[in-house]
Amino acid sequence: MSIEKSTKAARGSVQCENTNINLLKANDYVADIIRNEMAKTKTLLINITSSAGSGKTTLMQKTAEKLKDKLTMAVMVGDLETERDAERIRESGIQALQIVTGGICHLEAQMVHQVLPEYNLEDIDLLFIENVGNLVCPASFDLGEDYRVTLMATTEGDDKPKKYPRMFLTSDMMLVSKSDLLPYLPFSVDAVIKDAREVNHELEVLQISALKGEGIDAWCDWLLNKIKEKQA
Amino acid sequence: MHETSIVNSIIKTLELEFEEEKLDKMSAIYLKVGKLSNIEPRLLHNAYTAKYPCGTKFHSIKLHIESTEIQIQCEVCNHITSVINYRFLCEKCDRPSKNLIQGEEMLIHKVEFED
Ligand SMILES: Nc1nc2c(ncn2[C@@H]2O[C@H](COP(=O)(O)OP(=O)(O)OP(=O)(O)O)[C@@H](O)[C@H]2O)c(=O)[nH]1
Ligand SMILES: [Mg+2]
Ligand SMILES: [Zn+2]
C-alpha cells in the first residue's frame, strides 16, 4: 500500500475526466455541416453502400438513364484507387466525381465535404454517394445523407444481414440486386428479408436488376417521392 | 485499415476537445465500444501501437477498451432485452424495436491526465 502511494507521488497526481464523447465526433460534426448545406439547396443526398461488386455503379448508370430527363442528378464515387467508376457513370451523361480514398476502406464526411464545392448544388435535385464496397466501416460514418441504401446482391449468399448487422440497422432501404440471377442461385429472398427485418423492422426492401430492369421503376418512384418530400 | 482511421478519429476528437498542453499530460484513454460498433478491441490496440510506436508523442497513453452488449428497451412495455443473434425483438411482448440503449456506442468514456 505504501509502495503504491510512493510511486504515485513520484509520478505526480492523476486527474480523471469523464468525457463520454463520441469518438467519431469530428466526423459527425462535418456530417451535420453537409446536412445543413443540403437542406438549404434542397438536394436529396443518398449514401449507397454494399459489398464490393454488388452493382452500385451499374445501378447509378441505370438510374441516370431513367431520371436524367426529369431532374438533375449527380454522383460522387468513393474508390480505393481508380477513376473507373466515375468514368462509367459520366458515360450516362451526368456529372460524376471520384474520391480516391488512397486505401481507406470507407468514405468520411470530411472527404465528401471537400469535393462538394465541385457541384452546383443549387441545381442538383439528387446527389448519390457511391461508398467504398464494404459492409463494415461505411456503417459507422455518417456522411450527412438523407437516406442510406444498401445493395445486397443475390450472388453474395443470403446471410449478410446477420453478418453485418450495423449496416442493415442503419439503412433505410435494402435493394436485393441482380435479381435476374435468382433462377441460378441458392438464394432465398424471403430468408434475407426475414433476417434483415429481424435486425431492422423498419427497413424497406425492393428487388431489382439493373441489368434487366426489374424493380427499377419502383426504385425511381421511391426516389422521386423522397425528392418531392425534400423540396416541399 | 478501419482500425487505423478509428485511431485517427480518436486523436482528432481529443485534439478538438482539449488544449495541447493538456493533451501532453494525457496518460490513459478509456473507450466504451458496443458490439455493434464493428470495433475489434485487439485490432484497435494493434493499430494504436502501429500508429504511435515507441518514442512518438502519444505512445505512452494507455488505451483501455470496454466492449458492451447490445440492449434494446421496448417502447411499449419498457422491458429491457439483451439482443442475441441480432434479433431486435422484445423478449417480453415480442414486438420489434430499434430503441437501442446500449451496444451501438463508440465513446471516449473517460480520460486521465498525469502531472
Ligand atoms: N447479372 C447481373 N449482373 C449485374 C447487375 N448489376 C451489376 N452487375 C454486374 O456485376 C459486376 C459489378 O457491378 P458494379 O456495378 O461495378 O458493382 P459495384 O458495386 O459498383 O462494384 P465496386 O464499386 O467495385 O464495389 C459487373 O460485372 C456488372 O455488370 C445485375 O443486375 N445483374
Ligand atoms: Mg462501383
Ligand atoms: Zn415489450
Image: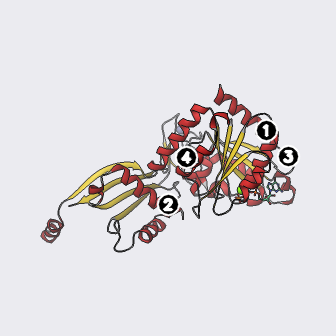
Output the chain of dot 1: A
Q: Which mark is residue B5?
A: 2
Output the chain of dot 3: A
Of residues B115 and A194, the one nearer the viewer is: B115
Of residues B23 and B36, the one nearer the viewer is: B23
Q: Is residue A43 above or below residue B52?
A: above
Q: CA distance from mark 2 to mark 4?
A: 17 Å
Q: Residue at x 49, y 64 (%)?
A: B4
User: Which residue in the protein does label 1 denote?
Assistant: A67
Front disc: 2 or 3 = 2
User: Which residue in the protein does label 4 denote?
Assistant: A113
Front disc: 4 or 1 = 4
Q: Residues within 10 Å of mark 3 (few under 14, many from 20)?
A: some
Of residues B6 and A178, the one nearer the viewer is: B6
- Horizontal arrangement in the rendering, residue B18 relative to residue B83 (left or right): left
Q: CA distance from mark 4 to mark 1?
A: 25 Å
